[in-house]
Amino acid sequence: YTGKGGVGKTSISAATAIQSAKQGLKTLVMSTDPAHSLGDSFGIKLSSEPLEIRENLWAQEINTIYEMEKGWGKLQKYITLLFTSKAADDITTEELTMFPGMEDLISLLRVLDYYKHNTYDVIIIDCAPTGETLAMLSFPDMLGWWMEKLFPIKRKILKVVRPVAQPILGVPLPTDDIMDELTNTLEQLGEMRDILSNRKVTSIRVVVNPEKMVIKEAQRSFTYLNL
């Protein structure tokens, strides 16, 4: 569910999840909005791990810092080392790993993991407002483009230039382990792109209320989503 801020995406996501669970379907409702309010809808404190809140119903609020520490150890250490090598002493490790789009990336990979392991029958995503949701849906293509353009070249020359370039540049260059992790991420995002574009599996629902600005934005979103 997506739409302009304040139209009721979270309430409708929660209501849909409850109805799905009542039908006997194992249902997960997940919030990817950095300003989470899903827990407020249920009157329950949620975390980055799914919490069973009633029969057949789990709820989750993605926490980027938690996800990075849990499953992105090597990449997180490299990013931290990269920035602290420039004496960014006043920036915390958590801040260093909160790149724009990181919530999008982590949310997509979480959904992919649930899908591949057939963990739930239904996954309902309470998305951020429209603009951020459109960015999330385009993230697999965007990151894939950058990785395919840049990494094949770097991978071939890194082993040769690393011993010489690293002391000159004053910053650490990514190791083979880091490159493997990034390549694996690209492959997973490719799988997620296929899932998002499969109308038999995925539907996107634009929430509106009877206001002119809201309806106009919904129309633009609908046009974009059909391209």
Image: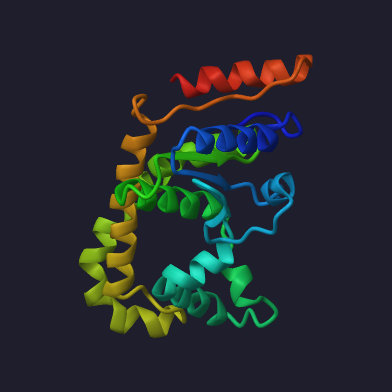
Measuring from the top left, give residue 78's x and y in whole percent. Answer: 44, 75
> How many numbered discs sit on the rendered protein?
0
**Residue 148 shows in this picture:** no
User: Residue 223: x, y in percent?
Assistant: 53, 17
- Which residue is pictured at 25% across the width and 65% down the height? 155
Taking 167 as reference, is 46 above or below it?
above
In the displayed structure, does residue 128 sit left or right of residue 103?
right
Which one is in front, 28 or 187?
28
Instruction: Determine the residue positioned at 56% across, 61% down.
Output: 48
Q: Quadrant of residue 62?
A: bottom right
In this picture, is 88 found above or below 99? below
Identify which residue is drawn at 69% across, 59% down: 45
Quadrant where the C terminus is found in the figure: top left
> Based on the displayed image, in which of its 4 quarters is residue 92 positioned?
bottom right
> Quick one: 202 or 177, which is closer to the camera?
202
Which quarter of the figure is the N terminus placed in? Answer: top right
Colouring of the image: rainbow
* Residue at point 73%, 34% (across, down): 5
Q: Residue furthest toward the right? A: 211
Q: Nearer the viewer, residue 109 or 157?
A: 109
Tell me where residue 191 appears, x and y as whole percent: 30, 43
In this rendering, the answer to whether 85 lies above or below 16 is: below
Question: Looking at the picture, does residue 46 appear above or below residue 1?
Answer: below
**Where residue 40 sits: x, y (%)?**
74, 49
Asked whether residue 200 is in view, the answer is yes
Q: Is residue 217 left or right of residue 213?
A: left
